[in-house]
Image (cartoon, rainbow, N blue to C red):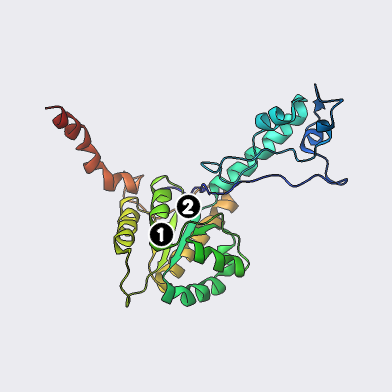
């Protein structure tokens, strides 16, 4: 799974315009059409809400914005906005996403881990289960949304994000001395980590080593424009595909067998 962004369950809306910050329509050089004599023409809240599914927390597109405002677009100004949005999207896509999870008895260690690695973590998109994300915000980080608590399905939600290619690494501070009611979910997530060959840190040392490696690669890519990754065997460009290929080859046979 390559470095990618992550879709989050929250909606995004532009800030209200101020005398110093004109509305989106004005910024795009647009003129109103049928609303010139309407009080609605003076509305300053120019962005529509983006549906949570697949939104990645980004602003609405220029087309949606124009439809909401009922305006005619100045092509040159709209082009500039489109280019800016494309740059914003590229930056989001190219920033790796790390999911952080910690059992209750391990949350103190995760807090200490975050405090020690705070500056490196700022360069990544972060997500995780509910309580963990609340802790990240307390420490000054800005996780992009959060999942439910682990026993309420949070581990499964992160697993789904992993399958969708939206998570590049999982740091899971597991408590080795307590029984867990949702052990099936924990094991399922661990299995998916192996199935999709994403980076995984299961304790402080491994998480620190993985984070340092990922951060080094990220800085190299930002400096050179070239993607850096681990050393792979010749002819094996996709580790996840290498793991999954034999299983996938049996799917057609299974479908045919179901017809008999």
- In the displayed structure, does residue 18 sit left or right of residue 124? right
Depth check: give the residue in front, 144 or 98: 144
Furthest-front residue in this view:
39
Quadrant in the picture for the C terminus? top left
Mark 2 vs mark 1, CA separation in Å: 36 Å
Frontmost of labels 2 and 1 is 1
Labels 2 and 1: the sequence-earlier one: 1
- In the displayed structure, does residue 189 sit left or right of residue 204? left
Residue at horizontal 74%, vertical 26%?
70
Label drawn at residue 228: 2
Q: Position of residue 4 (x, y in %)?
A: 49, 47
The residue wearing badge 1 is 152
SS at badge 2: loop
SS at badge 1: helix
Classify mark 1: residues with Cα within 10 Å, few (<14), some (14-19) or many (20+): few
Q: Quadrant of residue 187?
A: bottom left
- In the displayed structure, does residue 5 sit left or right of residue 192? right
Q: Position of residue 58 (x, y in %)?
A: 61, 43
Q: Is residue 191 above or below residue 202?
A: above
Residue at horizontal 59%, vertical 42%?
90
Residue at horizontal 26%, vertical 42%?
245
Q: Position of residue 171 (x, y in %)?
A: 43, 64
Q: How many marks?
A: 2
- In the displayed structure, does residue 72 sit left or right of residue 104? right
Q: Quadrant of residue 47?
A: top right
Depth check: give the residue in front, 57 or 3: 57
Q: Position of residue 133 (x, y in %)?
A: 53, 63
């Amino acid at each position: 799974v390559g470095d990618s962004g992550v879709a989050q369950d929250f909606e995004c809306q532009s800030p209200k315009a101020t005398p110093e910050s004109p509305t989106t329509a004005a910024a795009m050089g647009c003129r109103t059409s049928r609303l010139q004599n309407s009080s609605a023409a003076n509305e300053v809240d120019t962005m529509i809400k983006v549906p949570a599914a697949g939104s990645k927390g980004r602003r609405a597109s220029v087309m949606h914005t124009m439809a909401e405002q009922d305006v005619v677009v100045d092509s040159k100004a709209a082009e500039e906005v489109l280019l800016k949005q494309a740059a914003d999207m590229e930056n989001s896509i190219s920033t790796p996403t790390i999911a952080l999870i910690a059992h209750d008895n391990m949350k103190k260690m995760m807090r200490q881990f975050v405090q020690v690695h705070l500056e490196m973590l700022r360069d990544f998109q972060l997500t995780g289960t509910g309580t963990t994300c609340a802790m990240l915000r307390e420490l000054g980080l800005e996780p992009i949304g959060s999942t439910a608590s682990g026993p309420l399905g949070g581990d499964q939600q992160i697993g789904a994000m992993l399958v969708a290619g939206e998570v590049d690494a999982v740091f899971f501070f597991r408590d080795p001395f307590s029984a867990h009611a949702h052990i099936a979910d924990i094991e399922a997530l661990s299995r998916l980590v192996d199935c999709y060959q994403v980076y995984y840190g299961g304790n402080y040392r491994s998480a620190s080593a993985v984070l340092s490696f990922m951060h080094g690669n990220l800085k190299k890519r930002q400096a050179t424009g070239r993607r850096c990754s681990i050393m792979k065997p010749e002819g094996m460009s996709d580790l996840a595909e290498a793991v999954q290929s034999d299983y996938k080859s049996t799917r057609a046979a299974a479908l045919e067998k179901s017809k008999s």
